[in-house]
Image (cartoon, rainbow, N blue to C red):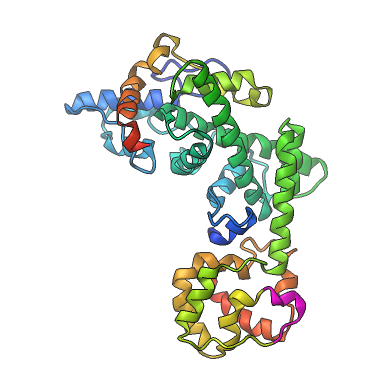
Amino acid sequence: MERGGDAGGSGGGGGYINRSRRHAKQREAAAAALGQPPVSDDSSPNVRGAAKFRLPAANPDAAGQEPPQRRSLPTLREQDQYMPIANVIRIMRRILPAHAKISDDAKETIQECVSEYISFVTGEANERCQREQRKTVTADDVIWAMGKLGFDSYVEPLSLFLARYRETEGDRASYRDPMMLKRSSNDFGGMVMPPPPLPPQQQQMVGYMQGNFLMQSDHLQQQQQQGMYDGGLMNGYYRDPFGSGSGSGSGEDGGGTSQNGMSGFDLYSQYK
Amino acid sequence: MRQPGIYSGILSSGRKEPHSLPLARIKKIMKRSGDDVKMISGEAPIVFAKACELFIEELARRSWNVAVQGKRRTLHREDVASAVAATEVFDFLVGLVADDDHNNGGGGGGGASRSNSANSSAGGALN
């Protein structure tokens, strides 16, 4: 598939094209064909996605519409190869002053840059894994790769972040969301009782374990309902989402009661 | 792949916000980075999510500085390109942000300019 179909391509072997220009030209061409004004719709979650839907399939200019495949893979949807633009914008807005405006093409450009960044770092991390004959790219490899590629200023914050994350997973969290506590006590209709004494490492789990310890038979059903609200919230507390296993053992296996209480959380696999 | 929920916010000094970036998507992009990327640990996308935040923040900040120097309040692709060119760590992006149409540099591209102005004029609402 030709990359340089309409915009004349870019310099350099990478062959990257300015997506917004390409799409903008197609929007114009398509819109002209349809007799409608082209619209830049920023309100949709994916600007390009919105534009794409407006283009008729028969439009000859649509040939270049799908992002050209990189690395000889079958054509991917844009949403598969980039971070969602809304998320990207939100992060940008944390940094920019309130009055700042961001053009569509700047948003798209940064979106592309993020994906490139991930690929770039992953490539380096993967190379190291291969050299050391390991099959799995780990978080440590990723952080190492960033240091190697010049992102030194990220290494420490990320290492800290990772350490905190691992700690958290190990303890099954020292964080108790007060909203969750409130919700559990409400949902269980006042059945909340003082928690049984727990071994130290599990005391911190009391917050959200509270309701679950105490309802033996019913809690599964109630958790099921509550799980609808908290599914997202609670999943991570009880299961290492990726089954990486290393940190997840200690918290869960702390004792008999906790095992019983935890067993119900296999239900959360539905949220996987 | 299941998205972790709000629990991730606890990792950021009690900030209640979930991971800003979807981990499944990150993992997909990682896998695409090379045919030989086989297995990815569960923590790697999580670290990347944070790293991408840092990356976006840095890129946005630098790009904004360029815009400010040009006495503008709208961030354009050219600003991003300038920031990339001026920063050594961003060398890998040079090909990606290269401006194809220098003729159209003013509005950010003949075709795109319409979308830009539409964006800027309604910028308050849309942004």
**B76 or B101: nearer the viewer:** B76
Point 53% across, 50% down: residue: B22
Point 61% across, 78% down: residue: A209
**B48 or A178: nearer the viewer:** A178
Q: Range of the magenta residues?
A: A197-204
Q: Is residue A96 left or right of residue A168?
A: left
Point 30% across, 31% down: residue: B122
Asked if residue A55 is positioned above or below residue A264 in the image, the reply reads above
**Image quarter of residue A52:** top left
The answer to whether residue A2 of the structure is visible from this angle is: no
Q: Is residue A45 left or right of residue A210?
A: left
Asked if residue A23 is positioned above or below residue B16 in the image, the reply reads above
Q: Position of residue A113 (x, y in %)?
A: 55, 31
**Image quarter of residue A177:** bottom right
Point 33% across, 40% down: residue: A43
Residue found at the far right of this picture: A132
**A206 or A137: nearer the viewer:** A206
In the image, residue A148 lies in the stretch drawn in magenta: no
Q: Is residue B1 left or right of residue B11?
A: left
In the image, residue A203 lies in the stretch drawn in magenta: yes
Residue found at the far bottom of this picture: A217
Q: Position of residue A96 (x, y in %)?
A: 50, 33
- Quadrant of the frame with the N terminus of chain B: bottom right
Residue found at the far top of this picture: B103
Q: Is residue B26 left or right of residue A166?
A: left
Q: How many marks?
A: 0
- Quadrant of the frame with the C terminus of chain B: top left
**A129 or B77: nearer the viewer:** B77
Q: Position of residue A33 (x, y in %)?
A: 20, 25
The answer to whether residue A37 of the structure is visible from this angle is: yes
